[in-house]
Structure formats: C-alpha cells, structure tokens
Image (cartoon, grey):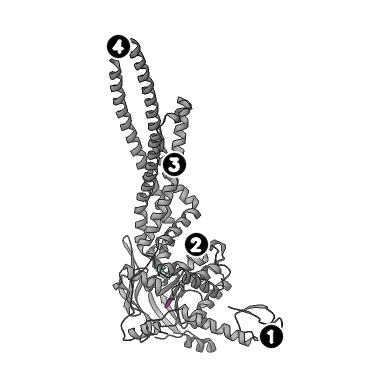
Amino acid sequence: MAKITCPSCGYEIDTPGIVTVCPECGADLRGVMEEVGHQREEMMATIARDDSVTTHEFIVRTRGLTKIYVMGEVEVPALRGVDLDVRRGEYLSIMGPSGSGKSTLFNMVGGLDKPTDGTCFIEEVDMAQLDAFELAWLRCRKIGYIFQTFNLIPVMTALENVTLPMIFAGMGTDEMMERGRTLLDLVGLGDRLHHKPYELSGGQQQRVAVARALANAPAIILADEPTGNLDLQTGKEIIDLLKELNRESGVTVISATHDLKMIDVSDRIVHIRDGEVERIEQRADLELEIGTLGSEHVTD
Amino acid sequence: MLDVKGLAKAARAEGGPIEIEKQMTLPWTDAFRISLRNVTLRLGRAAITAAGVVLGIAFLASVWTSKVVVEGLELSQEEAHRRQVEAVQTAAGVEEEAGTATEVVTAEEKANRAARQAWLVIMSLLVCTVGITNSMLMSVTERFQEIGTMKCLGALDMFIVRLFLIESILIGLLGSLVGVLIGHLIMLLVFCIKEGWDTPAKMDWAAMAVYMLVAVAIGTLLSLVAAVGPAVRAARMPPAAALQTEI
Ligand SMILES: Nc1ncnc2c1ncn2[C@@H]1O[C@H](COP(=O)(O)OP(=O)(O)OP(=O)(O)O)[C@@H](O)[C@H]1O
Ligand SMILES: [Mg+2]
C-alpha cells in the first residue's frame, strides 16, 4: 500500500508492489522506493509492541481450558479441556465446524469471559488472577480484537473509532490523532478519516476495525471470523492485510475461521471439534502436502 | 539518547511475567463529547426517552403555574376586597365581622387544594420515572454490543456507567426544559382565556421562575435516577455476553 510521487513529473503511483521506473515519464524510482520502504519499516516497528520478556516462546498458553454453559437444567459443554500453545509472532488459525467452540475459546483467551475450569496464560500471566482493572488494561494494551460484525461504534467516525482505545490508554490528543491517521493510512483508508461506519463498505469497516485493533500497539490480534460477513474478494484482502501486519510488525495473530482461504497465510492451523483440539497442522506439512495432494497430516 | 524501551526490556529480562498495570482513563471532556454525540445522533431514541420527562415535567409545571396564577389572582382579589371594605368602613364607620369567617374557609380550602396537588404531582412523577427507566432499559439493551465492544477496547465498568449517566442528564435537561415551557405556556393560556389577558400581570414572576428552575432540576434528577439501574446492569455484564446479544 505504498503511495509514491515521481520526483521528476509528479505522477502519483499507488501500488502494493515495487516500481523502479515511473510509468509516466520513465524516471528512475529506485531511490524513492527505498525511502518509502524505510519509512514503512520504521512505522511497522511502532505497530505492535513486544516489550515483554523474550525468554518464553509462547505468548498464549491454555491448560485444560473448559467452559460449560448452564442453561436452566441443561449443561452445554462448549470447551472440554483445551491445551494450546501459541508461539510469539505466529499466525494461528482456529478452524472447526459451527458450534465447535471457536468463539468460546476466543472469549477465554481474550479475557472476555471466565472459564469454568482450567487456566489461560497470556505472557505467563494467569488471567484468572487479574482484577477488573488489570483485565481492562490487558484488553486495552495487549490484545486487539476484530469481530465478524466489525463492531465499530456507530456514532463515531473512523478516526474516532481508532482513537477510542488510545483515550482509554491515556494517550495525549496530538499523539493520538497522529497515530490514528497513520494507522488508517496503513490499512488504506487515509482518505476516509471522517466517515461514519454506515458510510463505509463492509470491507472498509473491517479495515477500520483492524486499525482500531492496532491502536495501542498490541502483542496479539484476536480475530473471530474476520471475513464472515465479507465477500470472497474483500475477505481475501482483509486476510492479506492481517498477514502483512503479522509478517512486518511481528504481531501474533489468532484467528477463528471456517474460511479455507486462511490456510494459505497460517503458520499453524488448529482444528477443533466438539470443544476439543482435534489436530494441529503445521504450515510446513501443508506445503509438503501440496505436492502430493494427499490426506491430511497429523502433528503435535 | 536514552533507550527507554530497551531499558524496560532489560529490567524485565530476568524472567518474571509481564508487568500488568491498572491505570485506565476516560477524561470527562471525552465522556461528555461521546455522550453528547450519542444524544444528537440518536435523536429518535433520545426523543422517546425525553418524552417521558417532557410529560411528567409539563404536568408539574402546569400545576405550579396554576398555583402561582391562582395565588396572584386571589391576592389581587383580596386587595380589591380589602380596598372595598376599607372604603365601606371609612364611609359607614362600622366594624365588619364576616370578613374573618370567609378568610378561615379560604385557608382550609387552600390547604386541601395543596394536598390534592402534591398527591397528583407525586403520582405523575412516579409514573414518569417508571417510563424513563423503561425507555432507558431499552436504549441500553439496544447497545449491548457497543458496550461489549467498548469493554474489549479497555473500558472499565465505570466508564460505561459514566457515559450513560451523562447521556441521561442531557436527555433529562432537554426534556424538562421543553416540559416546563409546554406546561407553563398551556396553563397560562388557559387562565388568560378564563380570567382575562391581564392575568400574567397579576402573577408573582419571581416565584414562578423559582418553580420553573426547581421543575427542571427535578426532571433532570429523575432522568438520572432512572438511568442508574440500567446503566450499572449493562456495565457489569461480561464482555462476551454483551457481545453475543443479537438485536
Ligand atoms: N452464551 C451461551 N449460552 C449457552 N450456550 C452457548 C453460549 N455460547 C455458546 N454456546 C454453545 O457453545 C457451543 C460452542 O459455541 P461457539 O459460539 O463457541 O461455536 P463456534 O465454533 O464459534 O461456532 P460458529 O462457527 O457458528 O461461530 C455451541 O454449542 C453453543 O450452542
Ligand atoms: Mg463463532
């Protein structure tokens, strides 16, 4: 999503790829391109924050995570003892049929609900030990959430939606506006700062949500079916955006989905069924499989 | 240049868990801005909630207007009566005894009327509070998902309550201002038609102004009180439950 201007003829080029020669006047653009690359690298360094101890490999760990919903007389087990280790900086997809417990797992990991049994650690911190203030801090600073239904605040503009978590984090107004603009620029909505959610398309709304998830430079992005309400093409764009952020800024992405497009970008895929981890696929295995087009591999 | 980030990293490299802090903020100016936006951009919703306040306060204002007007009229009647009596007395030099009797009846009637009015006012305000609570509940329920989202972004329960309370104060203020105007003007018009267009001149406007201010204060307070329950209930919901509710 680089936007560069040809220094000799002023022609504006908007391209995700690398351009060495201006299509308008034929001038050499390598220098300009390099500078844009540097700027982007610098910015990416501010997108995600990993200021924790780097000694532990796993950013999220769950042990025996169990959730039983009680509805009157009936007990609905949504998770039955999930053990999951998420590596720092990986792109993890959670796949499974409807009702398998993806969203429930998501809620536990994101600190949005309490498990019936078992523990969930984020950066080695047991979430059950946190009080309301610490949980709010964790949600605000460490985790960025993306939802199937976008969940933008309808009365706020794109920029206001993105800066809301920064208000909670106590950021100063100028810094907040600056970062909000940068983030919206990053997701390709630099020209839609003051649009309200209903003035944006679904894909654009989800882009705002991605920018908002990055507001306080989180270590983890949790996305629950981020493409569920989008058409194929737009969904692909959102996934590519998430992958790009993951690769360039090192933010860990955990995404629940039943969208097969996710397979391409995932480092690992956790399959869950009836509230249990069925199997975990490694990307490396998948690449092997592409050659043989054979049966699925089981690892871990 | 000091590498703050690096230092922080080094300090924690011993191996403990990350440092979890507690501090979260929602400055009043931001809270006010967000709440005001919610009122102005969801005008339909706000109007429904405000309608309860408008009705209750309009009734209160009409009762108090009528009180002030009647007192003004009585005062001017008494005045006229007194002048008449004085005139008769000076003319005839006779003591009048019936005057005290009529006055006693008036005082009793006045007390009766005041009690009846107080009863009516209290009942109508109660009904109006129930109405506002109901529409506040609805307006909070409509926004469960928004509340859940805000909590995901780091909002404390307190922030959610704060936003809804500011909103209800704004709605209460607006509703009771409109209510006072409506109630007052209608009552005044009725008296003008009944008692003549010079009625406003016979009123104690200072007292009327105080009554109006008190009515606005009561309306705002009622709206605030009515919102506390629904706001606290919504704020306490776990984010997952708030996000899940579909409307
Ligand atoms: N609040 C709730 N109360 C009762 N049961 C619930 C609740 N939330 C989820 N469940 C149940 O828990 C199970 C897992 O639900 P969950 O939402 O995690 O599935 P999912 O994998 O996200 O499905 P989908 O792909 O349709 O989103 C389901 O059987 C569901 O009925
Ligand atoms: Mg789900």
What residue does disc 4 label?
B94
What residue does disc 2 label?
A156
Q: Residues within 10 Å of mark 4 (few under 14, many from 20)?
A: few
What residue does disc 3 label?
B179
Please determine if labels 1 and 4 lie on a single subunit.
Answer: no
Q: Is residue A224 visible?
A: no
**Ligand 1 quadrant assignment:** bottom left
Q: Does A216 appear in magenta?
A: yes
Q: Nearer the viewer, mark 4 or mark 3?
A: 4
Q: Position of residue A79 (x, y in %)?
A: 36, 72
Location of the C terminus of chain A by quadrant is: bottom left
C-alpha gap between disc 2 and disc 1: 43 Å
Decide if ligand 1 comes within 8 Å of the CB at mark 3: no
C-alpha gap between disc 4 and disc 2: 80 Å
Q: Residues within 10 Å of mark 1 (few under 14, many from 20)?
A: some
Location of the N terminus of chain A by quadrant is: bottom right
- The part of the image, by quadrant, that contains residue A114 is bottom left
C-alpha gap between disc 3 and disc 2: 30 Å
Decide if ligand 2 comes within 8 Å of the CB at mark 2: no
The magenta span reads A215-220
Camera-side residue of B241 and B185: B185
